Each structure stands twice: as structure tokens, then as C-alpha cells.
Image: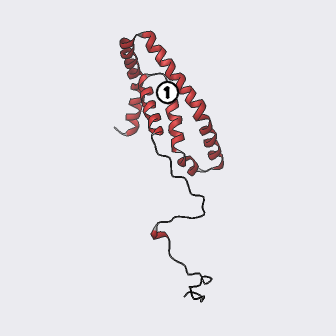
């Protein structure tokens, strides 16, 4: 089977797996506790989407309006936070677990190094070569050659 068929099968099997996971959690902690836990996690996903997702959605809209795909690819953690919020909002313990893993991966992801604002551009050695400047002089006061 190709990837599309596996993805379709997984999407069709997900509700049954979620129901089985909910029954297992409800049998362990009780029905009311399982429902309360599910509501609390969905509320946390909603709060995450409102807090972190709102700014990211506006950045995505701006990038799509200007046709800048690089702006979308540069904001990887914002997209992962948005995905985590959606997964936490969807009812079900399996999607909540996946959303929690995605959210934790965004928290432990290293941010890109901040660009120095000192006017110096640091290039790899294969991308630069020395250029002689006739305005420079050596110690004797004569121009260098």
C-alpha cells in the first residue's frame, strides 16, 4: 500500500483507538475523572492556541499575502506550537499525548542563534577571499602592494 492509503487507514482507525484509550483511562481513574481530564486538556489546548497561535496565524497570513514561503519555513517552532494546540484541543487521549510530545519538543528546541548587530558578517572560508585596498598603508607610510 502506498502512503496515502496508510494515512487514510490511520485516520479512519483513530476514532476507534481514541475510544479504546478513553475506556481504558475511564476504567482506571473513573468516568467523571476521565471526562474532567479530557475537558481540562482541551481547555489547555484552547488557551495555547489563543496565546501562541494567534500571533503565528497572523504571521502566516502576512507571509501568504506577500508570497514569502521562506518566512513560513523560518518559523518552525510557531508551526509546531500551533499543531500542538490543535492536537490538544481535539478530544482524545492519543491526540493529547502526541500534542504534548510536540509541545515539549518545541520547548526543548534550541532557538536559532541571534544575529550580531556589530556590522560583521561571518562567512565560511570557502565563501571569501582577501581584496587589497589601495588606501591601506604599511608602517613606513607607503601604500601596501
Residue 39 higher or lower than 45, as above or below = above
State the residue at coordinates (62%, 50%): 67
Residue 68 in the image: state x and y as whole percent: 60, 51
State the residue at coordinates (36%, 39%): 2
Residue 92 higher or lower than 118, as above or below = above
All told, the count of numbered labels is 1
Residue 134 in the image: state x and y as whole percent: 60, 84
Q: Which residue is mark 1?
A: 88
Q: Residues within 10 Å of mark 1 (few under 14, many from 20)?
A: many
State the residue at coordinates (42%, 31%): 98
Residue 120 in the image: state x and y as whole percent: 57, 64
Query: Would residue 43 appear left or right of 61 to someone viewing this image?
Result: left
**Residue 12 figure quarter:** top left
Query: Would residue 142 appear left or right of 83 to someone viewing this image?
Result: right
Query: Would residue 75 appear left or right of 98 to someone viewing this image?
Result: right
Q: Nearer the viewer, residue 20 or 143?
A: 143
Q: How is the image coloured?
A: secondary structure
Residue 47 in the image: state x and y as whole percent: 57, 27
Outermost residue, front side: 140
Quadrant for the N terminus in the image: top left
Label 1 element class: helix
Quadrant for the C terminus in the image: bottom right
Residue 8 higher or lower than 130, as above or below = above
Query: Would residue 5 appear left or right of 85 to someone viewing this image?
Result: left
State the residue at coordinates (40%, 34%): 7
Amino acid at each position: 500500500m502506498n502512503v496515502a492509503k496508510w494515512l487514510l487507514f490511520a485516520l479512519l482507525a483513530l476514532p476507534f483507538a481514541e475510544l479504546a484509550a478513553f475506556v481504558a483511562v475511564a476504567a482506571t481513574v473513573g468516568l467523571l475523572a476521565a471526562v474532567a481530564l479530557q475537558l481540562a486538556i482541551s481547555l489547555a489546548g484552547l488557551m495555547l492556541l489563543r496565546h501562541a497561535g494567534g500571533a503565528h496565524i497572523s504571521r502566516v497570513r502576512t507571509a501568504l499575502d506577500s508570497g514569502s514561503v521562506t518566512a513560513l519555513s523560518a518559523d518552525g517552532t510557531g508551526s509546531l506550537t500551533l499543531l500542538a494546540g490543535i492536537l490538544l484541543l481535539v478530544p482524545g487521549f492519543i491526540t493529547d499525548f502526541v500534542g504534548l510530545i510536540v509541545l515539549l519538543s518545541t520547548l526543548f528546541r534550541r532557538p536559532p542563534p541571534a544575529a550580531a548587530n556589530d556590522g560583521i558578517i561571518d562567512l565560511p572560508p570557502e565563501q571569501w577571499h582577501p581584496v587589497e585596498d589601495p588606501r591601506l598603508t604599511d608602517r613606513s607610510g607607503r601604500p601596501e602592494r
